[in-house]
Amino acid sequence: MAKKINIIGAGVAGLCAGSYLQMNGYETEIFELHNVPGGLCTAWDRGGYRFDGCVHWLMGATPVNSIYRMWNELMDMKNLPMVFSDDYFVMEDKNGKSLTIFRDADKLEKELLEKAPKDKVEVLRLTQAIRHLAKLDFTNKKAPEVITLADTAKMIWSMLPYIKTYREFGSVSLKEYSEKFKNPLLKRAIREGFVPEMSAIFLIFALADMHRKGSAYPVGGSLNLARLLEQRYLNLGGKIRYHARVKKITTTQVNGKEIAGGVELQNGEVVPADIVISAADGHYTIFEMLGGRFMDKTINDYFNNYLVFDSYLQVSLGVARTFENEPTLLVLPLNETLRIDDQTTTDMVGFRIFNYDPTLAPEGKTAIVATLGTKNYRYWTELRKYDKEKYQSEKQRIARVLIDLLEKRLGNVAQNVEEVDVSSPATVIRYTNNWKGSFEGWVLTPKIGLKQMKKELPGLKNFYMIGQWIAPGGGLPAGLMTGRHVAQIICKKDMKKFTTKSF
């Protein structure tokens, strides 16, 4: 009889883990608090528009990146159209100057040397590192828990040519690295290309994969991607329960050892299992569903000392016109500093102009999305709870400022806005339960590096954690890889050969 495995969360990690376990003969069931798959990899429909909340690009979009072959085990990549845009983003300043961060390293080098000639030495160093790392396949095909000495030796040997570059850029944050540049616009583009505290190596890795055309935008966006993963899982015989919030992970004692025995839902139903996997929020898993009983110093250090990605407001606009000649991501300066909440301000806003995905808006119209980061998630959750009128007015205030900004820069926008939707940290927490409303998990800082939390907790058997809370940097690959890895670990413990099925 097949082992029963309960998986908490139908995000990317949970769906991937479920599919790989189904491929290897296990019986799985996923419990999801929302009514759609994807978790943070999601989108929502308003007035004929679809507003995307996640994917900017998919790493492993083509076979040049070995992640492609893993994605192709979970969805038919040949039938998923990709968009390879020239630009990653365009940043402008108040003086009308602009800087394009191209995905191609040769175009990027030419642009930066032209716009920032005084930064020639550092620009050449940057683009050389991008080209160098474009030759590296940095995918961990096997879980660290199952690799052999031969695997380790092979991996170390393949990494040797890149260690110097990794150390050079992995030891500084983007904020620190940006100080090496003199040009103000380039300095800011580097600092805020991702998150200022993030290790600079993350930017190099991302641009390297873009340069070799290993990353691209999947047409249909986040929810389409999540639905494809969901369909694969269901076709393999998996089961999903939506609107099924897990309150507790049940445990039993056998020979003095604590063993995970199933899940208890919010409605009181207990669903037994041989193994439990949490692909849900890490803080909720450890401190709520398990009551903080399975801890050690390392876990405490993560939650007390490591940086998490900010929460955010997302302002989504449905505009009844097209923007054919505008960049995919346009970063604009504000004339006046925008107050987001009582602890957060900004003087620049980035707009994703979905002129490259016609599936997200009716013909002749365009979806535009802007995200505004904030660490003050409590302000928004408490405002929604205690003063809904002000909560709505504050969201509308911010939306008006952004519409005015687009009107001044692009023209013919304000009168054509048909839909305005503003989500807040309170929205993120309601629909995903993510700690602090964070949009990914741990920031890949120089301090944390590529170090991952263990998938198993001290003192608890037959339980695993996967997803962005064990893999710094987060993102879709973290969900895929940790989901695949946990299936490998379970197969190894059961002395089964891990097998996969590709499209």
Image: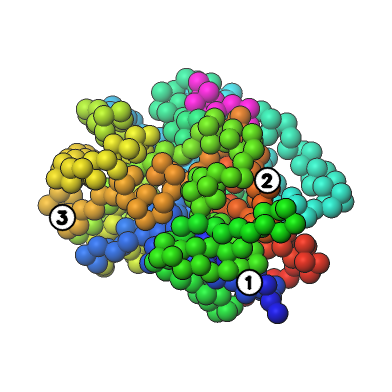
> Marks 2/1: CA distance?
22 Å
Quadrant of the image for the N terminus? Answer: bottom right
> Marks 3/2: CA distance?
56 Å
Whether residue 171 appears in magenta in the rendering, the answer is: yes
Compared with 476, 346 (above or below) is above
Q: Is 58 placed left or right of 45 in the picture? A: right
For mark 3, give the secondary structure. Answer: helix
Q: Main secondary structure of the magenta part?
A: helix
Residue 245 visible? The answer is yes
Residue 347 percent coordinates (x, y): 29, 29
Quarter of the image for residue 97 reads top left
Residue located farthest toward the left when viewing the structure as drawn: 415
For mark 1, give the secondary structure. Answer: strand
Mark 2 Cα shell of 10 Å, populated few (<14), some (14-19), many (≥20): few
Q: Label 2 belongs to which residue?
A: 458
Quarter of the image for residue 156 reads top right
Residue 340 percent coordinates (x, y): 26, 34
Instruction: Mark 1 vs mark 3: give the one in front.
Output: 1
For the record, the magenta segment spans 170-179
Q: Residue at point 62% right, 41% down?
A: 295
Residue located farthest toward the right when viewing the structure as drawn: 150
Whether residue 131 appears in magenta in the rendering, the answer is: no
Residue 469 percent coordinates (x, y): 55, 46
Mark 1 Cα shell of 10 Å, populated few (<14), some (14-19), many (≥20): some
